[in-house]
Amino acid sequence: MDFATGSCNACGATGTALMKLSLGKDFFGRTYDRLSPSTDQSPKWYCEACSMQKNLQRDFRDILGEFDKLAAGQASALSTQEEFQRASLRLREIATLLTGTAGHAPFLTAADVAQLIGRMHTTTMQA
Ligand SMILES: [Zn+2]
């Protein structure tokens, strides 16, 4: 029996359904090479709450990275109004989902999300 497959890789939860998380595409539809099935050398297993948060964290990081580029005046996936709007909506969704998982947040805090929403809001005001 392989003990490592019996607990969540993030919070260590046991005795609950675990799912192998495939992070094949990022928020902007780009491929995650490191985590593609053929090159992923260390697949992770997460319980439901952690896998949900892991997905939120992934989208958050994608959006944060692109927003930092936008703020620095570089080419960014958020340059278009449509993508910027989509990312803003997703952040609000993430913030809402996070409040439902308070106390179970190994990946992402509501404060991080609120800060990015605030930064993006300021940018919108300037536009
Ligand atoms: Zn977990």
Image: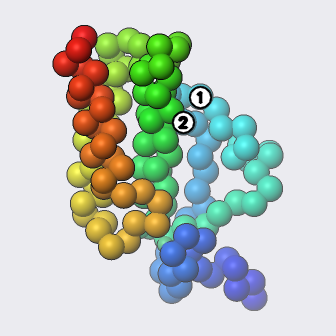
Q: In this view, does 78 lie above or below 12?
A: above
Q: Is residue 57 above or below residue 50?
A: above
Q: Is residue 36 left or right of residue 120?
A: right
Q: Is residue 14 left or right of residue 110?
A: right
2 and 1 marks in contact (CB < 8 Å): yes
**Can see residue 68?**
yes
Residue sitting at x 36%, y 49%: 112
Furthest residue in direction front, as rendered: 72
Picture residue at 69% right of the left edge, 46% below the top: 35
Residue at (61, 67) in percent of width and height:
45
User: What kind of residue is marked 2?
Assistant: Asp
Crowd class of label 1 (few under 14; some 14 to 19; many from 20; radius 10 Å): few
Cβ at disc 2 under 8 Å from ligand 1: no
The residue at which mark 2 appears reads as: 26
Quadrant holding the N terminus = bottom right
Residue 59 quadrant: top left
Residue at the image point whose x is 34% and y is 22% from the top: 84
Q: Name the residue under label 1.
A: 30
Instruction: Indicate which disc residue 117 carries.
Output: none
Q: Could you say where residue 103 lies in the image, as x and y percent from the top left?
A: 33, 73
SS under mark 1: loop
